Amino acid sequence: MFVTERLVAPLVGIGLMMSAMTAPCFAFDTKNEMNEDSSPFALFKFGFSAYKNGHKDEAVKALRFAAEKGHQGANWKLARMYAEGDGVKEDDYEAYKMFEQVIREGADQGTQNESYVADALVALAGYLRRGIPNSPINSNPGAARDLYLQAASNFGDSDAQFELGKMLMKGEGGQPNPNQAARWFRLSAQKGHAGAQAMLGNLLFQAGKTVRGLAMMTAALEHASKQDRAWIGDIQEQAFSIADEADRRTAMVLAEDIIKTGDF
């Protein structure tokens, strides 16, 4: 919702931790004379540059200083690094707290901070969906579904739309709603999300729209990421084995058109 022209993702009913991120200060001295007295943006810019050049220790120091000074992008980048064990020891609970802080700060319309908040919502939803072992964060699919809905609705995030669609299909975290699932899959698919394109194609195939559904799954497989190719390939092959030869041929031609035009 909009509050004083600032888009803030509400965290009601989730039981999130209220404490803000705390981080120790580090001595920070480089040839570029960057230090903790530099502006938040300068620290963030330096940290991001250090990260891209493989100097992740220096990146972490600069990003910490920038985050302490309120730079939302620095907080988000640190959260990502902790979530992925990228340059620091992987720590999902630390990442969770940092993502939570990004959400609490909200985002002005039309700013880069919108993407940080959207990504943080999706990240927190994932943590709440499965829980974080050895931490206060337990699995709470209902809360996860609410966060995906916020990111999908307020920010139009394609990953959130896809994950929300899956939860609605399975009835995970609430009642199943295939019609709403298809709606979210379509919105995500139109943004180029291969997983959503495959899921939407599979729904169409099961609804009797054999050629269109098979073509969409085939097109989705063509540009899917490595981690998605396995499951998309499985449902596409299963559909191919059921379809008759004429439908297969027509679907392959249509898939080529979809790939060229991006019209899902």
Image (spheres, rainbow, N blue to C red):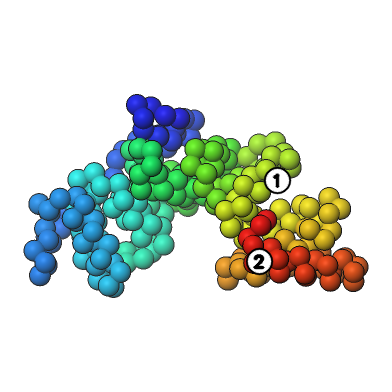
| Residue 238 seen in the figure | no
Query: What is the quadrant of the N terminus in the image?
Result: top left
- Residue 79 shown left or right of residue 38 in the figure: right
Image location of residue 48, percent across then percent down: 27, 62
Work out whether residue 77 or residue 218 is closer to the camera in this orientation and state it: 218
Q: Amino acid at mark 2?
A: Ile
Identify residue type, mark 1.
Ala
Cβ atoms at labels 1 and 2 below 8 Å apart: no
> Is label 1 or label 2 in front?
2
Residue 38, position as x, y percentages in the image? 12, 53
Determine whether 258 is above or below 103 in the image.
below
For label 2, count other residues whose C-alpha is less than 10 Å away and answer few (under 14), some (14-19) or many (20+).
some
Q: Does the image show residue 81?
A: yes
- Callout 2 secondary element: helix
The answer to whether residue 30 is above or below residue 10 is below
- Crowding at dot 1, Cα within 10 Å, few <14 / some 14-19 / many 20+, comes out as many
> Percent from the top left, x then y, of residue 182?
70, 45
Residue at 58% of width from left, 71% of height from top?
Answer: 226
Query: Which residue is disc 2 drawn over?
Result: 259
Q: Which quarter of the picture shows residue 118? A: top left
The residue that appears at 90% across and 71% down in the rendered structure is 245
Residue farthest along the top direction in this orientation: 4
> Which residue is depicted at the point 58% across and 46% down?
161
How far across and down, in percent of the image, does residue 24 sit?
19, 52
Q: Label 1, on which residue?
A: 182
> Separation of disc 1 and disc 2 at Cα?
21 Å
